Amino acid sequence: MARKPELFISMDIEADGRVPGLSSMLSFGAAAFTLDKELIGSFSRNLRLLPEASPEPDTMAFWAKNQEAWLLARQDTMAPGVAMPEFTAWLAGVGQGHQPPLFVGYPAVYDFKWIDYYTVRFAGANPFGFKGCLDAQSFANGHLGGAFRDASRRAWPKDWSDDLPHTHVAVDDAIEQGAMIVNMIRAARGLPRIGGIVRLDLQDGVGG
């Protein structure tokens, strides 16, 4: 019996600090990619702030330089208790017919902890579990060799990147990052590069 195809969920989050619970997640975006670089779904929500949390000054200094992205992240905000169950339901739907979805991020150590905290707190469980996470820089380091800190995005082969925007809008960055990670995985497996995203986007959860 043939194995089900893999499904890579590229995720990007925006927050007003570095520590979930002490600060708030402002928005998050997810883009579901197959190994054939098919974008089969995307999801995005802007979140209301946690009443007990506080913004971190250093992070707010970043947002002061990125006002347009900040304003977009503050439009049509939703309670986390509504948004996170919607996300887990979307993930279950888009994942049908595939292996359990794999969270992919850059750096995953940052984005995953926010999704872990918010899904456990507001949806009852993290749908990725505690193993389903791939860090792009770690994967690149394993493929390219050398020192880990030399395997940052600036050192990656140019054909790993597509001509896609990096806007600090969560779903845009998740799509850009997901295409890049698929390119990276295909290169590591000796598969030919696919020039552009196959935008099926059949299960879209963008918006409120």
Image (cartoon, grey):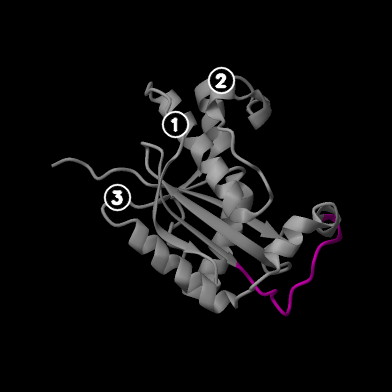
Q: Amino acid at mark 2?
A: Gly
Q: Residue at x 26, y 53 (%)?
A: 97
Q: Amino acid at mark 3?
A: His
Magenta stretch: residue 70 in it?
A: no
How many marks overall? 3
Q: Residue at x 75, y 60 (%)?
A: 70
Q: Residue at x 36, y 63 (%)?
A: 92
- Packing grade of label 1 (10 A; few <14, some 14-19, many >=20) is some
- Magenta stretch in the rendered image: 46-58
| Numbered disc 2: secondary structure | loop
Residue 185 disc label: 1
Residue 46 at least partly seen: yes
Judge depth for marks 1 and 2 and give the one in front.
1
Nearest the eye: 157 or 55: 157
Instruction: Using residue 154 as the reference point, say whether residue 203 is left or right of it.
Output: left
Predominant SS along the magenta part: loop
Could you tell me if the residues under marks 2 and 3 are in contact, i.e. CB atoms within 8 Å?
no
- Give the residue pinned by disc 2: 145
| Numbered disc 1: secondary structure | helix
Residue 98 disc label: 3
Residue 29 disc label: none
Instruction: Using residue 70 as the reference point, say whether residue 5 is left or right of it.
Output: left
The image shows residue 59 at horizontal and vertical percentages of: 80, 56
| Numbered disc 3: secondary structure | loop
The quarter holding residue 14 reads bottom right
Residue 17 at least partly seen: no
CA separation, marks 2 and 3?
Answer: 30 Å
Nearest the eye: 29 or 25: 29
Q: In the image, is residue 174 above or below residue 91?
A: above
The image shows residue 111 at horizontal and vertical percentages of: 60, 53
CA separation, marks 1 and 2?
Answer: 15 Å
